[in-house]
Image (cartoon, helix red, strand yellow):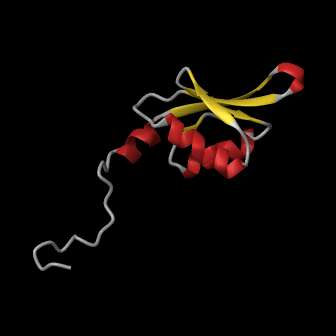
Amino acid sequence: MSEDDPFEDLDVPEDPTADLDRSLQELTVRTEQRRYGKEMVIIDGFETDTDLDDLASDLKSALGTGGTVKDDRIEIQGAHEKRIRELLREHGYQVEG
């Protein structure tokens, strides 16, 4: 640690307002029935420049399932609505309902 910067060891993100932007968004999470009775969880309501591909990847990895990003929303395969709500809250998002 240099003597010039007493805050050098602090882990400060490049954009400290990013968490604030995330917390101001209110996302909608719902389950839709698709072909052959398959369930798909739809997450929408993203307002800022959220990296949806990165977030979708994190959610898919945590759930061990597939999914995609379409039309500014995330679609996750399976009946994971409750767990997705929990994961989004852990990422700092507000979830409707």
Q: Residue furthest right?
A: 36
Q: Note whether 17 is above or below 50 in the view shown.
A: below
Residue at the spot x=71%, y=48% of the render? Answer: 63
Residue sitting nearer the eye, 40 or 94: 40
31 and 65: which is toward the camera? 65
User: How many numbered marks does the figure carry?
Assistant: 0
- Residue occupying image coordinates x 12% and y 80%: 3
- Residue found at x 44% / y 41%: 22
Res. 81 image quadrant? top right
Left or right for 17, reference 26: left
Quick check: 13 above or below 49? Answer: below
- Whole-percent x, y for residue 2 in the image: 15, 78
Quadrant placement of the N terminus: bottom left
Q: Quadrant of residue 79?
A: top right
Residue drawn at x 56%, y 32% as measured from the top left: 27
Point out the image quarter for the C terminus. top right
- Relative to 81, is 48 on the left or the right? left
Q: Position of residue 4 (x, y in %)?
A: 10, 74
Residue 68 rendering spot, x and y as whole percentages: 63, 31
Q: Is residue 30 above or below residue 86?
A: above
Q: Residue furthest left?
A: 4
Residue 37 at x, y percent in the picture: 88, 24
